[in-house]
Image: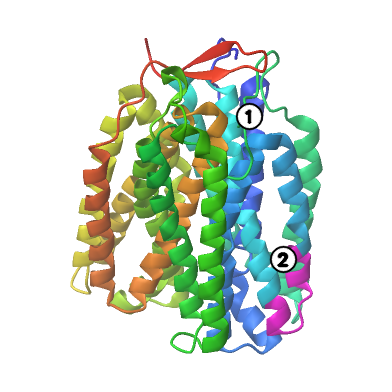
């Protein structure tokens, strides 16, 4: 990897070209993933949907993303980011078009469920960017990728209603959503023809097996099985929300069948983990090839609290401001958008801080700030001046999104050939967090909701004490058997 090229955001050559094309791809995936949110009222009227059915579409939109991020991480490690990202953008344009032409709830629900797959695009760029940037720039680069790409959801909220109005009529929303599908399809070809997986002369290290994450000790084998449980539990929780106890979309029989299916799927997953890792029970992995799964588990918990809370808070903040300060929906939306706008600088900022001051110290400070920030949000009520409440939300947002950037400043430094899978699992935990927090929100008041997030941030802080600061080098084995050493910190 060439490290001589300067980190210059205004450059569009070499590694900077890869970074810009990566965040653009991620940006488009988020525009497509959240293209329905700002058009829900038009969609509801056009298709004659009930409020419960609209809420169901929102649930279905995130359901598939949890297993998709894990699967896409595996495919990325095996086949490379260039092919997988291009294929994802092209294939996911199909359910986007399906949603644009849907005539009833069932068609819309199937399309929205399938569109959850595009939410997995994030993990692909994490691996690609890690191949092109040295360790001392990696946090900043991953932060720019994540922060600028993540802004796609806000961009969709600002632009798609206008696009729908330009076309006008009852079908304006269909054209707006269809255009996002065209963007995704066209950029698939741009990406494929403009990107390479590694700099010239560098090796793309691939996992030995496709189907489950490799671990390097017996203890980590069982640790991995435990850390998989919350992902299946979150899907079970989503099924419960669709049951007669929730939005009453599915019958008890169907929901029970889903529970049984998830249990069988977990056991099948367990068998894959055993098949890939059974050798560690026969002979120990050479010290030079080992990594600690504890590092992955800590990052999973931190991303649960950071990105999970962001997804949940973004979805409820306009209503929170509207009800607390008696604002109009338009004004509440504008005020709440300040939270999402912080992504442009906060996430790159968290990565930059990690590069400059160390991964673990940065995460400790940001996680502590996250806990304090959400505790303060829990204190907000109608007696507060509006400007102070907005300031509190923006300050909280800084710690949330900087924390996300700092988490993914560590992910590529654990085991290079598994970066996609590690990013996939960590990313999935963000969605698990969103499901849990939104479920909590449906059961408690706003203050308690914010206090629960603050509490999980404290848990994240405690687990972070067990994480080791990345140091020295990680070893990967070339196809010819020689060992390549990759720097992960200053010597």
Q: Residue 374 in the image: state x and y as whole percent.
A: 25, 58
In depth, the one of 339 and 270 nearer the eye is 270
Compared across the picture, whether 108 is left or right of 382 comes to right
Seen at 70% across and 70% down, the residue is 111
Q: Main secondary structure of the magenta part?
A: helix
Q: Quadrant of residue 98?
A: bottom right
Residue 180: name its quadrant: bottom right
Residue 432 in percent (x, y) is at: 44, 60
Image side of residue 209 versus residue 216, left or right = right
Question: In this rendering, does residue 51 appear at all?
Answer: no
Which of 29 and 278 lies nearest the eye of the viewer? 278
Q: Quadrant of the C terminus?
A: top left
Residue 36, quarter of picture: bottom right
Q: Is residue 97 magenta?
A: yes
Q: Which residue is mark 2?
A: 177
Range of magenta residues: 95-108
**Residue position for label 1:** 206
Is the Cβ of the residue at disc 2 closer than 8 Å to that at disc 1? no
The secondary element bearing badge 2 is classed as helix
| Count of picture labels | 2
């Amino acid at each position: 990897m060439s490290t001589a090229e300067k980190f210059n955001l205004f450059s569009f050559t070499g590694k900077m070209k890869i970074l810009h094309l990566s965040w653009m791809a991620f940006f488009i995936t988020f525009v497509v993933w959240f293209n329905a949110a700002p058009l829900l009222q038009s969609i509801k009227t056009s298709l004659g949907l009930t409020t419960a059915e609209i809420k169901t579409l929102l649930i279905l939109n995130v359901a598939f993303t949890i297993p998709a991020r894990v699967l896409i991480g595996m495919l990325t490690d095996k086949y490379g980011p260039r092919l997988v990202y291009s294929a994802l953008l092209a294939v996911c344009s199909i359910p986007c078009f399906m949603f644009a032409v849907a005539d009833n709830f069932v068609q819309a629900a199937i399309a929205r469920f399938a569109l959850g797959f595009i939410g997995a695009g994030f993990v692909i760029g994490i691996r690609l960017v890690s191949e092109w940037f040295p360790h001392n720039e990696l946090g900043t680069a991953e932060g720019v990728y994540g922060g600028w790409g993540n802004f796609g959801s806000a961009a969709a909220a600002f632009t798609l209603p206008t696009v729908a109005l330009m076309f006008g009529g009852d079908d304006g929303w269909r054209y707006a959503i269809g255009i996002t599908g065209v963007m995704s399809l066209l950029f698939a070809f741009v990406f494929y023809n403009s990107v390479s997986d590694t700099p010239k002369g560098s090796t793309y290290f691939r996992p030995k097996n496709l189907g489950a994450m490799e671990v390097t000790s017996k203890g980590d084998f069982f640790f991995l099985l435990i850390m998989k449980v919350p992902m299946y539990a979150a899907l079970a929780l989503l099924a419960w929300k669709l049951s007669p106890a929730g939005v009453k979309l599915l019958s008890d029989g169907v929901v029970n069948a889903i529970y049984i299916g998830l249990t069988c799927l977990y056991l099948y997953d367990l068998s894959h983990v055993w098949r890939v890792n059974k050798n560690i029970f026969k002979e120990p992995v050479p010290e030079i090839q080992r990594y600690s799964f504890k590092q992955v588990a800590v990052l999973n918990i931190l991303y649960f609290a950071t990105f999970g809370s962001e997804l949940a808070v973004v979805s409820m903040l306009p209503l929170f401001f509207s009800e607390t300060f008696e604002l109009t929906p338009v004004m509440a939306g504008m005020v709440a958008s300040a939270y999402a706008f912080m992504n442009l600088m906060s996430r790159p900022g968290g990565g930059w801080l990690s590069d400059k001051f160390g991964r673990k110290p940065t995460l400790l400070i940001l996680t502590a700030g996250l806990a304090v920030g959400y505790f303060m949000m829990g204190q907000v009520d109608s007696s507060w001046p509006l400007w102070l409440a907005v300031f509190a939300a923006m300050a909280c947002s800084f710690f949330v999104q900087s924390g996300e950037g700092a988490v993914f400043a560590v992910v590529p430094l654990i085991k290079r050939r598994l970066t996609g899978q590690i990013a996939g699992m960590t990313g999935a935990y963000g969605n698990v967090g969103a499901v849990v927090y939104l479920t909590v929100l449906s059961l408690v008041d706003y203050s308690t909701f914010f206090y629960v997030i603050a509490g999980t941030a404290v848990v994240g802080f405690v687990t972070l004490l067990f994480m080791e600061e990345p140091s020295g080098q990680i070893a990967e084995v070339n196809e010819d058997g020689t060992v390549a050493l990759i720097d992960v910190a200053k010597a």
